C-alpha cells in the first residue's frame, strides 16, 4: 500500500516545483486526498489536469489506490 | 476494449443526455463519491440515467479506456465526458454545471 509520502514523491517527480499535499483520509493507505498546484496545468481544462495526475500515479490507480479526491489548479499568476 | 463494449458505451452516452456511470444504483449508491454526484444531479433537478458499473464488468473496464479515466463515478452530458466526482462538484458549485446542462438542452 502506498504512503502519502510516496504519492507525494511521485507527483513531485512528475510535476517539479509543484505544490503537492497528500492526505490519507482513512488511515488505511488506500483512500487519499491530493491537492496539486502545478504550472504544468496552466491553460489546461480540469479534465486534462486530472488526467495528468492519474498518468503520474500510473498503475497505482488500478489497484492500490481505491479512492483519490483530487483538487488541481495552475499557480495563481499574481504570486508566481 | 472490444468492439461490442465500445458500441454499448456509445449507445448509452448517445441515448441519454445525462448519463451517470456509478457504483451501485441511484436509489442505493455503493460508494460515497457516486452518491455525491447523484445528490448534485438531484439538486440540479434534471432527469438522468444511471448505470451500475459494478453489475457489468465489460462496461466497467471498457469505459475507463473510452474516457481515459481510471475511476468512478463518470458523468457524461450530451455525449461528452464531463468528469468525476471532484470536477462535477466544482462545476456544480461554480454554476458551470448548470450552463453545461443548458447547452445540452436539458435545463
Image: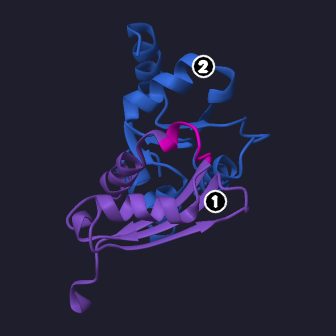
Of residues B55 and B44, the one nearer the viewer is B55
The reply to whether residue B8 is visible in this rendering is yes
| Closer mark to the observer between disc 2 and disc 1 | 2
Residue drawn 56% across the image and 64% down it: A4
Examine the structure image and report whether residue B64 is included in the region drawn in magenta: no
Q: Mark 2 lies on which chain?
A: B
Disc 2 with disc 1 on a shared chain: yes
Residue underneath mark 1: B43
Q: Position of residue B84 (x, y in %)?
A: 50, 49
* Vertical order, A44 against B49 (above or below): below
**CA neighbours of label 2 inside 10 A, class few (<14), some (14 to 19), many (20+):** few
Does residue A44 appear left or right of residue A24 in this picture?
left
**Which residue is found at the position 53% from the left and 62% from the top?**
B89
The label on residue B57 is 2
The stretch of residues the image draws in magenta is A60-66
Q: Where is residue A68 in the image (x, y as percent from the top left)?
A: 56, 55
Q: Which chain is purple?
A: A
Amino acid at each position: 500500500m502506498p504512503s502519502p509520502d510516496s504519492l507525494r514523491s511521485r507527483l513531485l517527480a512528475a510535476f517539479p516545483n509543484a505544490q503537492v499535499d497528500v492526505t490519507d483520509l482513512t488511515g488505511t493507505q488506500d483512500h487519499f486526498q491530493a491537492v496539486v498546484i502545478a504550472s504544468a496545468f496552466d491553460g489546461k481544462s480540469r479534465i486534462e489536469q486530472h488526467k495528468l495526475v492519474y498518468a503520474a500515479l500510473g498503475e497505482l490507480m488500478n489497484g492500490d489506490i481505491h479512492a483519490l479526491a483530487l483538487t488541481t489548479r495552475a499557480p495563481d499568476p499574481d504570486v508566481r | 476494449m472490444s468492439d461490442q463494449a465500445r458500441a454499448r458505451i456509445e449507445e448509452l452516452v448517445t441515448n441519454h443526455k445525462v448519463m451517470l456511470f456509478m457504483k451501485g444504483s441511484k436509489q442505493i449508491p455503493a460508494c460515497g463519491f457516486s452518491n455525491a454526484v447523484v445528490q448534485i444531479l438531484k439538486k440540479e433537478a434534471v432527469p438522468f440515467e444511471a448505470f451500475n458499473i459494478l453489475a457489468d464488468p465489460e462496461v466497467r473496464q471498457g469505459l475507463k479506456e473510452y474516457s481515459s479515466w481510471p475511476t468512478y463515478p463518470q458523468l457524461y452530458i450530451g455525449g461528452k465526458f464531463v468528469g468525476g466526482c471532484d470536477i462535477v462538484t466544482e462545476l456544480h458549485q461554480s454554476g458551470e454545471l448548470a450552463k453545461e446542462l443548458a447547452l445540452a438542452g436539458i435545463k
